[in-house]
């Protein structure tokens, strides 16, 4: 995991950094709350470990600012303040977990592992779109330029696969595994046949062609 540690106590920071490095994690260490907020805003971290009492900007304010900005990186708040009210304030302020100093590194590691096992929470996607091509995931309807396109079930799954990965080349093997659930090549033209049918429905009547064949490579839905 890539972890941002915001801790101004030299001994605690050295203790945590040394342990995390030993477990194979990548750690960026900062000592100032404002710097930590700026760095965390990038969203490039898997976990934040933040001391509550930081210079510049306290750790709780850092987390509140991140959550207000819809940065949902999991965070563990470190503090010497161990009352129930303090823990509740930390959790309500955006912390996923709360550890009172002093703490054993093995406990911190266990809490990190617990967070890592949690499934990521994402906003539910209800529609996919590429240009004027739309796929309504609730109604399972496809339209282009407002006109409805009727697809067979496998054609729908094929288009959904492409629309979830616009601009990314999809090989024949990837499509067989992802759309047909086949982990072997059946030595048939099933992929080519469905690509041709799908292209006839979503591209043929229009000037702009989305589904492109890269000969000898695969297929791509061009954004």
Image: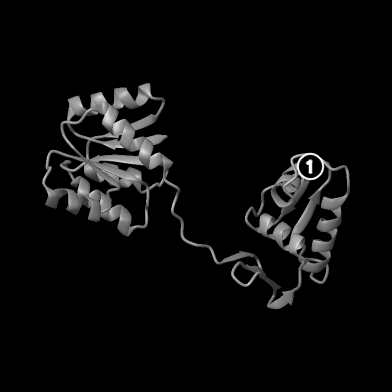
The colour scheme used to paint the residues is one colour
Residue 154 percent across, percent down from the top left = 76, 60
Q: In the image, is 48 to the left or to the right of 13?
A: right
- The residue lying at 77 percent from left, 66 percent from top is 152
Q: In terms of depth relative to the viewer, which is nearer, 61 or 189?
A: 189
Q: Residue at x 85, y 52 (%)?
A: 190
Q: Is residue 95 left or right of residue 41?
A: left
User: Is 136 rendered above or below residue 27?
Assistant: below
Q: Residue at x 24, y 51 (%)?
A: 91
Residue 141 lies in what quarter of the image? bottom right
x and y, in percent, of residue 210 in the image:
74, 60
User: 73 left or right of 187?
Assistant: left
Q: Please say if 38 is above or below 13.
A: below
Along the horizontal axis of the image, is 112 left or right of 84? Answer: right
Crowd tier of the residue under label 1, counting other residues whose Cα lies within 10 Å: few below 14, some 14–19, many 20 or above: few
> Residue 168 placed where, x, y %?
67, 48
The x, y position of residue 150, in whole percent, is 76, 72
- Res 212 visible: yes
Residue indicated by mark 1: 217
Q: Residue at x 68, y 78 (%)?
A: 146
Quadrant of image for the C terminus: bottom right
Q: Which residue reaches farthest bottom?
A: 147
Q: Is residue 46 visible?
A: no
């Amino acid at each position: 995991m890539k972890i941002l540690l915001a801790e101004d106590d030299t001994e605690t920071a050295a203790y945590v950094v040394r342990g995390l490095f030993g477990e194979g994690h990548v750690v960026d260490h900062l000592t100032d709350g404002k710097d930590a907020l700026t760095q965390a805003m990038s969203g490039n971290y898997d976990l934040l470990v933040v001391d509550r009492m930081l210079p510049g900007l306290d750790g709780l304010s850092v987390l509140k600012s991140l959550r207000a900005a819809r940065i949902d990186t999991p965070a563990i708040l470190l503090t010497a303040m161990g009352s129930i009210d303090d823990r509740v304030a930390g959790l309500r302020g955006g912390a996923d977990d709360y550890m009172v100093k002093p703490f054993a590194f093995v406990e911190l590691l266990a809490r990190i592992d617990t967070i890592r096992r949690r499934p990521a929470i994402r906003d539910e996607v209800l529609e996919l779109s590429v240009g004027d091509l739309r796929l309504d995931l609730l109604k399972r309807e496809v339209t282009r330029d407002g006109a409805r396109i009727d697809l067979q079930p496998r054609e729908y799954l094929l288009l959904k696969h492409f629309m979830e990965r616009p601009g990314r080349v999809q090989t024949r093997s990837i499509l067989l595994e992802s759309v047909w659930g086949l982990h072997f090549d059946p030595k048939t033209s099933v992929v080519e046949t469905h690509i041709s049918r799908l292209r006839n429905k979503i591209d043929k009547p229009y000037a702009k062609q989305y589904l492109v064949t890269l000969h000898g490579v695969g297929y791509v839905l061009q954004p």
